[in-house]
Amino acid sequence: MLQFVARRLLEALVVVFLALTVVFALQFLAGDPVKLFLPTDTTQKEIEEFRGRLGFNDPWLVQYARFLRNALRGDFGNSLRQQEPALALVMLRLPATLSLSGVAMLLALGIAIPVGVISAARRNSWFDHLGIGATVLGQAIPGFWLGLMLIYVFSVWLRVLPTGGRGTWLHFIMPSVTLAAFVAARFARLTRSMMLDVLGQDYIRTARAKGLSPQRVLYKHALKNASLPIVTLLALQLGQLLGGAVITETIFAWPGVGRFLVQALLNRDFPVVLVGVFLTAVLYSALNLVADIAYAWLNPRIRYE
Amino acid sequence: MSSTAATLAPALTEPRRARRRLPLNRSGALGLIVVVLVAGAAVLAPAITPYGPADSDLVKTLQPPSRAHWMGTDQLGRDLFTRILYGARVSLTIGLVTVGISGVIGLVVGLISGYLGGLTDVVLMRLVDVQLSFPFILLALVVNAILGIGLQNIILTLIITGWVVYARLVRGEVLALKTLDYVEAARALGAQQMRIVVRHLLPNLWTPIIILSSLQVAQFIVAEAAISFLGFGVQPPMASWGNMLNEGKTYIYNAWWMTTFPGVALVLTALGVNLVGDWLRDTLDPRLGP
């Protein structure tokens, strides 16, 4: 097990290192990186001065080495707008994003797993059909439109919820529902199909034959065995929530990393953008790592492959 | 030789037989109808509506749905229904072009990676891993912001960010196919590499690629809308459902139709494409259950 964890950790570190390289390379996607970092109305003299000061005239290998060295120390340069270290500015907004993602994930699981279990237990019932319909719809409705519709219904029309911002628990409702919808749909579908698989197994029949209550069979015997892929999806979907947060936070003016990134993109504040992209990749890789380890821990067969 | 022929036969004929008759189920038919309707609306837009997508009428701004303007007008007095029809052109163009090009790139990379193996495989797959270590929508947003706004750049963005899923899929399939008896047999008979790839591997790759593509079309359409919604991507006056929703957001207090109808169009299209995708998956590949 330890060996497995060590190997996966090493792989994750490689991915993080390569992600840094991608972030470095992103600057060159538009041709001249200096143009990204400066407003469009900058004079040629200012551009040259900026180029010299930040070392953009050096060979790219030298620039790359310097970028890596600084990144290792957590130095990604200052925000062009706020003249403060970009990393600190992004980190400041991380708790808001994590709390929103956490609440959304709990909400998604709290709805999706019971729905998936009941759908599977009562296959082809009206509940099952309703559940399938809801998941298909949940996967087709883009988060940003769901968010707009929620704002229209609950803020503009009924006037019961705030349109955006952060403060009371009321502020959590619409953004977390928006974020949770898509994820919940995937979980419900997966739970249902895994449960259908498991419910057909011999040991379930044995458990039933022993006279165990249907509840006990369903939750103790079936769900436990169906939970493996659900755990894996959990970590992967947490990563997707980080991506979804970009849009949800923008709609609901949620002061998290996602909204900060979109503003930085609109302001062409690229040091902030690069940090945000990099941090997301690190979090995402970490979550994948956790998923793999959890999977191996729950399923000993994987460890020895 | 006869045993080779026996293993060869099912592998080559099965996909073909499946392609000949695709039994339609109810949700598949529904999806197909929606997709045909949206495509028809996109192609016939000028014949359906008397207005142009950028025709503004400053006397008739923010009008609710009426007989003259079925879905109302926006802040510049443009007919919303017309803009949704023209928006369908943008969405479908983006969906099809990006899926086509990113699919071909991913196919080629996946074939090379899976077939050659070795160092080439390691390098290419690390590249794929890294790209997949960023959430898709975030990477697409950043790439688009760097490349710049406009229809061409959003297509380029989605190609740059979208090819990796194909590469990974194709590589996995090639690795599995490569070890099958009939490929070994072809190699033993002295078939050239190119012939093995084109005649023996490629025909077996179409099914997974078609299934993935149907899901990717919806994903790309929604991604474009999301990026345009955030103010990048396709810019007004060109109509895209995403930028229409972005404009609608500003007027959510006094013009509900501006945020409602483009979203309905987007959801219906995504739903239709997804239903067709599910149907294709269920009929072409019985191994993958719902």
Image (cartoon, helix red, strand yellow):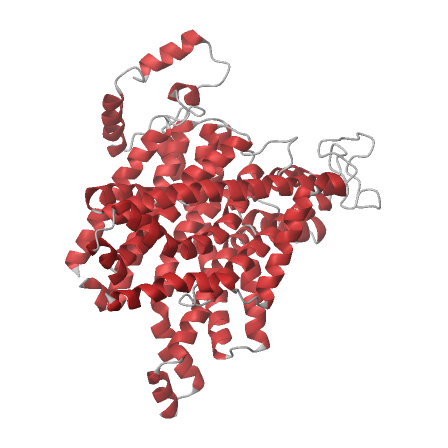
Residue at point 57%, 59% (across, down): A137
Q: Which quarter of the image is occupied by the C terminus of chain A?
A: bottom left
Res. B31 image quadrant: bottom right
Residue A35 horizontal/vertical position (percent): 43, 19
Which residue is at the front of the view, A60 or B192?
A: B192
Residue B152 horizontal/vertical position (percent): 52, 31
Residue at point 59%, 56% (across, down): B272
The answer to whether residue B255 is visible is yes
Residue B42 horizontal/vertical position (percent): 66, 43
Residue A209 horizontal/vertical position (percent): 37, 92
Residue at point 37%, 56% (across, down): B204
Which residue is at the front of the view, B227 or B24?
A: B24
Eyeballing the image, is B142 above or below A203? Answer: above
Which residue is at the front of the view, B268 or B64?
A: B268
* Residue B105 horizontal side relative to residue B126, left or right: right
Eyeballing the image, is B276 above or below A228? Answer: above
